[in-house]
Image: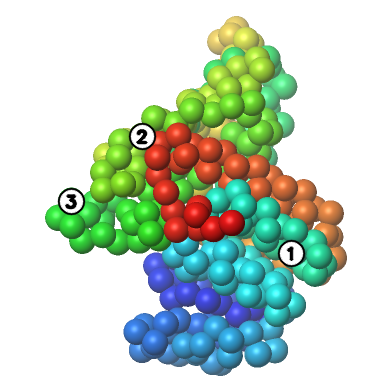
């Protein structure tokens, strides 16, 4: 993979050392804004990246085959579409797009161009998450699922004073659902598929959800998903079945050890996850699928990402949360 990165924010700074160290991945360039020119150039120098850009068009002209899109949520569609139209594979940070219309358009374009398009959502590629999938049969039938990803934001105090950062800005497709709740939705849909219906009850401040409770209805069980940026609590997940339950006391973006508890009192703890940065498994999977030209696996995951966008879009609609891309036809 010859990778070009668009974005120089926190998530890039956090993951860049691990991405650069991956076999079969060479970072050829990184692009930031004119305002962040010095920061982008420093990132390039610190990590041995040959070129730093302030023009996305110039980055696309480099000898790269894949673009990693790590910009504010509301720009995901614009930059992903431009990269696909330029003939590049794309890895785009979660959420893949701001709404269902954009997600469907990107998925269709990737197929039309016969290119890879991946949503960078760590949950699906973590081995402890795969362990949950294998353990479900031991507790089925499932009756209740509880998810909580509540993390008091370092930007919330500033938000209350009127200093609106992208994570709390409806114009930047922010909010608790899109930032943290998206992990819960991926967690649930990755195990059980798309729900029959959803309901979102949110705490709204300055036209954005600072926290909220999403319920997802399936034919034979119910899901409650909590995501919060205005308060905090230990992350945790429980899947309750008639034969026992599965639990995890870490957020789904990192997936900690999985506890299996059966009704007869039997308990086991499973922890099969390597001690590595949480972004590594997904990037390894992306590189492998590109190398093997495994479009089938890519497009199956892409359909899942579109379904997640449908849930998020419907939830926002119910809460009256409007993003800039929602008004486009």
Q: Position of residue 54 (x, y in %)?
A: 47, 88
Q: Nearer the viewer, residue 164 or 268?
A: 164
Q: Position of residue 275 (x, y in %)?
A: 54, 54
- Number of numbered labels in the structure image: 3
Kindly identify the residue that appears in the image at 42 percent across and 49 percent down.
322
Q: Quadrant of the N terminus?
A: bottom right
Kindly identify the residue that appears in the image at 58 percent across and 90 percent down.
58
Separation of residues labelled 3 and 1 (CA atoms): 40 Å
Q: Secondary structure at mark 3?
A: helix
* Farthest-out residue, left: 161
Numbered tag placed on residue 109 in the rendering = 1
Q: Quadrant of the C terminus?
A: bottom right
Q: Secondary structure at mark 2?
A: strand
What residue did someone put label 3 on? 160
Quick one: label 2 or label 3, which is nearer the N terminus?
3
Residue 73 position (above or below residue 50): above
Q: Is residue 119 visible?
A: yes
Q: Position of residue 88 (x, y in %)?
A: 71, 76
């Amino acid at each position: 993979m010859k990778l070009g990165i668009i974005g120089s924010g926190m998530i890039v700074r956090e993951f860049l050392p691990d991405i650069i160290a991956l076999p079969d991945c060479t970072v050829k360039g990184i692009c930031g804004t004119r305002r962040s020119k010095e920061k982008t150039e420093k990132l390039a120098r610190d990590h041995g990246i040959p070129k730093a850009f302030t023009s996305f068009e110039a980055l696309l002209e480099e000898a790269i085959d894949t673009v990693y899109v790590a910009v504010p949520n509301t720009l995901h569609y614009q930059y992903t579409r431009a990269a696909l139209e330029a003939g590049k594979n794309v890895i785009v940070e979660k959420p893949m797009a701001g709404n269902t219309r954009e997600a469907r358009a990107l998925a269709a374009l990737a197929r039309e161009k016969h290119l890879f398009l991946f949503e960078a959502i760590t949950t699906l590629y973590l081995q402890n998450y795969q362990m949950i999938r294998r353990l479900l049969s031991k507790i089925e039938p499932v009756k209740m699922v509880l998810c909580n990803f509540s993390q008091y934001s370092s930007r919330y105090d500033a938000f209350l004073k009127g200093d609106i950062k992208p994570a709390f800005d409806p114009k930047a497709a922010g909010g608790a659902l899109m930032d943290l709740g998206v992990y819960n939705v991926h967690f649930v849909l990755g195990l059980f598929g798309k729900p029959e219906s959803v309901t979102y009850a949110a705490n709204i401040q300055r036209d954005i959800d600072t926290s909220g409770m999403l319920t997802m209805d399936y034919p034979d069980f119910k899901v409650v998903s909590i995501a919060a940026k205005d308060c905090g609590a230990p992350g945790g997940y429980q899947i309750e079945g008639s034969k026992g339950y599965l639990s995890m006391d870490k957020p789904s973006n990192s997936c900690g050890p999985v506890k299996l508890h059966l009704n007869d009192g039997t308990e086991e703890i499973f922890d099969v996850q390597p001690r590595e940065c949480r972004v590594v498994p997904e990037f390894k999977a992306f590189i492998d699928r590109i190398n093997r030209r495994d479009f089938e696996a890519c497009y199956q995951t892409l359909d899942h990402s579109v379904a997640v966008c449908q849930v998020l879009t419907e939830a926002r609609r119910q809460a009256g949360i409007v993003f800039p891309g929602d008004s486009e036809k």
